Each structure stands twice: as C-alpha cells, then as structure tokens.
Amino acid sequence: MESLSLEQLSFRYDDKLILDGLDLYVKKGEFVSIIGPSGCGKSTLFRLITGLEKLQQGMIRKEYEFVGYMPQRDALMPWRTILKNTTLPLECKKVSKADATAKSMALLKQFGLDHYANNYPRDLSGGMKQRVSFIRALNASEDILLLDEPFSALDALTKIELQDWLYNQAKSLNKTILFITHDVDEALYLSDRIYTVTETPIQQMHETVVPLEHPRIRENLGSEEIQKLKIDLLHLLQKGRS
Amino acid sequence: MKKNAPAIIVGGILLVLWEIVARMINEMYILPSPTAIVLKMWEFREALFTVHLPATAEVLAIGLALSLLLGIGLAIAMNSSSWVERAFYPLLIASQTVPITALAPIFVLWFGYTIWSKVLVTVLITFFPIAINTFDGLKSSKREFEELMLTYGASKWQVFKKLQMPSALPQLFTSLKVAVPLSIIGAAIGEWLGAQAGLGYFSKRMMTQLDGAGVFAPIVILSAMAIISVIILRIAEKKLITWRKD
C-alpha cells in the first residue's frame, strides 16, 4: 500500500530543469531516505510534495491530504510557547482548542517534554527544539512525514541521540517517513530503502534496499556488507557531483 | 532601584544647583527656581488640573486614537494589496520629510478654535510613523513560517492573525514610544496657534505675561505626561512581547 507516489515528475525553475520524469514511491510504514549533494533538487521535490510549488508535469498521489513537514531548522515561532507551537497545525485545521491541547500535551508527555509546555523556544536546547518540531509535524499529518535534514545542524552526540530517538518513534508510531540527508551512515541506520541522486536534473534515482533487520543495532553498521554498500553509495554521490 | 541610583543622585544634584543659581540670579521671570515652579503649580492647581490638563488630554486621546485607527488600518490595507502598497508607501516616505508642525497654521485656518485644529496636527505628526512601522512589522514576518503554515492548510486570515500580527508587534510598540511623546508636542503647538484652553495655551499666556514659573509649570506637567506614557508603554510591551528577537 503506497502512502506516496510520484509519477513522471518534471519541474523547471525559470530556465533550469530540476526534475526530469522522476518516479518515486513510499509504502505505508516505510522509512525512505533520499541522499544527494546540495542544490540537486531535493528541496524542490519536498516543495512539490507539500504543495508549496505547483505541479508542472507528472502526478503526485498521496493517501492523505496533509504531509507533516519538518524543516531543516526547527522554525519554532519565538512568540509561542512550546505547547502552542505544537498545536499550530491543529489550529490551522480548525481543531478545537481543548482537543488540540489534549493531543499535544499527550505527545509532549510521551516525549518527556511536558514540563516545558509553557516555556518558550529560547529556553530549549537544539536537540529539544528538533523534538518539538517533530511533534508539530506529527500533528500536521495523519501518516506521512517529510523530514528535511533535521539533524544536520546538531552536534555529533545529540545527532546520534536523536537518530535513535527518531528510529524508535517511527517504528512504534508506525509512521511513513521520507527523509533527506547528506549523511550516508544516518541513511543506512534509519532507512528501509535509500534513493540516491546521481545526476541533475534528476531523472531516476538509484534505489537501494538496506539489508539490515529490524530493530536496527548500530554495531551492525560495521559489517562488511554494509561498509561495502556505504562505499558504493559514496561513489554514486561523487559521480553525481561531477 | 539600585540601577537607577546614580541617575537619581545626579538628577537631584542638578535640581539643587538649579535652585541655587536661580536664587543667585534672582530674575524669576526668566529663570524661576524649582521651588518657585512648584509653588506656582500649587497656586494654579485648580486651573491647571481641572481645566487645562483635561483639555490637552482630550486632544491627545482623540488624536492618538485616530492615528492608531488610520495608521494601523492603512498598514493592513497596504499589506493585503500590492497596488495599495505601491500607491501609498512612497507617499508615506515622502511625507516624513515634510515639516508637519509648519503646516499647523493651515489647520487653524480651516478649523479655527475648535478641537479639530489641534487634533489634526496631532494626527498628522503621529499617523505616519505608526503606519510605516506597522507595515514594515507586518512584512517582516519570516517566509519560512508562512510556508510552514501553508503546508498545514492555513487560510490567509490565519496567516495574518497567527504570524503577521505577532511579527508586527515589536515595530508597533517602537513607533508608539516615539509617536506618543511627539503627539504631546503636536498638541502643544496646535494650542499655541488656536486654542482657548490646554497646557500649551496656558504656557503661552504665561509667556505673554512674563511669568517664568507660570510658563514652566504646564511644561513640567506635559513632560511628566510624556514620561508616564512611555513607562506605561514599556510595561505593556514587556507584558505582550514575551520573546526577544535576536
């Protein structure tokens, strides 16, 4: 069952062709990563999926109307409390204040952030803000989440902590996730499948199934098979660069 | 209080110096001493506080209310329509260079000694900074927030209420902290030209009678009004703007 399906997607910015007949799909409950060099068109892809850009050619099929977009920087509104930041998507959907508050408080509690409900973003660390941003994205969508390099701005230790956290949440909540990253290790650890951008404009992406069982254990990343896969992917990326 | 102690000390010393110098020169019609001013305020307390202060306050209240209504209204209109923005924004900028207070005689010519001549001078001084600053504030909302809200299915009204209005608040308060003292100047000037009551009118009448303390007294009250209003605005600002943009 596909939550998201892109068919023959082509897109042009002014004169520049960014996507050229691209196909992509994500099955329900899957964690799919897209890796590719900067400026290759990954953000354009997300903008098309979220509806921020109008389709030019091709089709996008979504099982649900709204996708939960988690931007690169946390983009939490500084004038809203943590609680009100997480209820924002529900407010936009005209959910009642009581329901929105209840739902968000439950999520905040689940993620151990309920004590910060009445704090402001400036009181929180980078890692905590990303978690709040994730909760907000959960409120935005029934099922599918688009995460745009959410951990790239964090320090190495926080990054690992949040990767583990995201992996556990994704599996326990059974969410469908499309994830953009530069970090091949991150993609291998988290994903069921990886799409690699090998050329611009993007015509087809190289598709890899990650041969690891669930639940994922970090030590397994060190296996010979995975290391070889990592090197293959890095080569593909370098080819795409030139 | 500790932070303000040095300022209070220096202020106190200056007052004492003023008192001493004024007594030494002993020309009270030019340089009245602080105690002479206070005595004069007490002597005229009924006139000052029951006739003239309310008169000026009325001008200020109506003038500022009109300015806020028109200024914020125009800012919202410019924010909603690109045509309105292109029509009015250059005019607003140009009007900032016009010496508004020099236009005051025109209003006395048109509206005589009614309250409107003074209200209009006040409005003209305060309307433009409020309009421009509120508009800039509305426009300053970050694009990434707007796009995020669009992915949530937000309507244009929701984007205005939840994003643009809070984004505009800091600028609005900045313009108010400037506009309110300016409005007091505007009211005083309007009164000099065409009034029969008010603190500005009173100081001019005392001036023609060469009554130094009489001139200072209403001015002290006007200054106190300006200072108190800015303090109130600061308190309101702290309460409403609970974040700081870095």
Image (spheres, coloured by chain):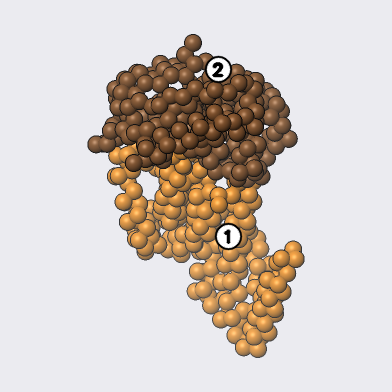
Chain colours: A brown, B orange
Residue at coordinates 31% horizontally, 33% vertically from top-left?
A201
Q: Quadrant of residue A158?
A: top right
Chain of residue at mark 1: B
Report the number of numbered marks: 2
SS of the residue at dot 2? Answer: loop
Q: Is residue B60 left or right of residue A82?
A: left
What's under tag 2, amino acid-wise?
Answer: Gly
Q: Is residue A142 left or right of residue B189?
A: right
Residue at the image point whose x is 43% and y is 48% from the top: B136
Q: What's under tag 1, amino acid-wise?
A: Ala
A154 to the left or right of A17: right
Q: Nearer the viewer, residue B198 or A81?
A: A81
Looking at the rendered structure, whether the residues under marks 1 and 2 are on a common chain is answered as: no
- The label nearer to you, 1 versus 2, is 2
Query: What residue is at 49 percent from the left and 53 percent from the top?
Result: B175
Q: Residue under circle 1? A: B226
Between B132 and A84, which is closer to the camera in this rendering?
A84
Q: Secondary structure at mark 1?
A: helix
Q: Position of residue A123 (x, y in %)?
A: 66, 45
In the rendered image, residue B197, in percent from the top left (x then y), is placed at 52, 59
Crowd rating for badge 1 (residues with CA inside 10 Å; few <14, some 14–19, many 20+)? some
Q: Residue at x 51, y 37 (%)?
A: A183
Which circle marks residue A29 in the picture? 2
Outermost residue toward the left in this view: A15
Question: Is residue A117 among what the camera can see?
Answer: yes
Residue A197: x %, y % from top left: 39, 32
Image x and y of residue B241, in percent: 60, 46
Marks 1 and 2, Cα distance to the nearest angstrom?
63 Å
Q: Is residue A69 above or below residue A157?
A: above
Q: Chain of mark 2?
A: A
